[in-house]
Image: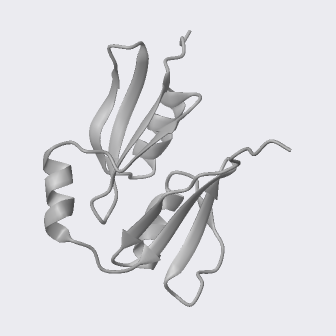
């Protein structure tokens, strides 16, 4: 049998687990009951996001934000509709949806703990 990776999920350290769960629900993630009150797994379209309530280095977070370093990137089919959904649900957009040099569109969000996530996809032709 040939090995095949079937999932790959980021684990984000967060200050307030309930706050972070609420934030990621704005994108459509669903969460089960947190384990021992400090760990939760969100699922969206078969992908997972792990959240762990734990301390982190604020100086590093600030540096990453100030220099546009991404913590994660996700590909999205229907990027315009997903962007509209995120805006309507109150996601913190730090870079609005825009065309890229390589023929896609992307936008960046920042979560309550300072993580920067890019969402991108092929532009769709709207009638």
- Camera-side residue of 126 and 70: 70
**3 versus 127 height, above or below:** below
Q: Quadrant of the C terminus?
A: top right
Question: Which residue sits at x=32%, y=13%?
Answer: 101
Point out the residue furthest to the front here.
1
**2 versus 37 height, above or below:** above
**74 versus 46 height, above or below:** above
Point out the residue furthest to the bottom here.
36
Residue 50 rendering spot, x and y as whole percentages: 53, 66
Q: How does the figure colour the protein chain or chains?
A: one colour
Question: Which residue sits at x=86%, y=44%?
Answer: 1
Point out the residue furthest to the right here.
1
- Camera-side residue of 118 and 25: 118
Residue 108 rendering spot, x and y as whole percentages: 33, 40
**19 versus 89 height, above or below:** below
Residue 68 rendering spot, x and y as whole percentages: 21, 42
Residue 106 rendering spot, x and y as whole percentages: 39, 29
All told, the count of numbered labels is: 0
Residue 126 as seen in the image, left or right of residue 15:
right
Question: Which residue sits at x=55%, y=56%?
Answer: 9
Classify residue 95 by image quadrant: top left
Question: Which residue sits at x=66%, y=73%?
Answer: 32
């Amino acid at each position: 049998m040939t090995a095949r990776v079937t999932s790959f999920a980021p684990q984000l350290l967060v200050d307030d687990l309930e706050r972070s769960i609420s934030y990621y629900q704005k994108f459509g993630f669903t969460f089960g009951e947190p384990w021992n009150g400090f760990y939760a797994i969100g699922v969206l379209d078969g992908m997972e996001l792990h959240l762990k309530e734990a301390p982190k280095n604020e100086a590093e977070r600030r540096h990453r934000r100030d220099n546009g370093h991404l913590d994660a990137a996700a590909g999205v089919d229907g990027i315009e509709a997903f962007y509209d959904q995120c805006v309507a649900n109150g996601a913190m957009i730090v870079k609005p949806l825009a065309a890229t040099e390589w023929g896609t569109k992307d936008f960046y969000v920042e979560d309550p703990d300072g993580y920067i996530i890019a969402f991108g996809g092929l532009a769709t032709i709207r009638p």
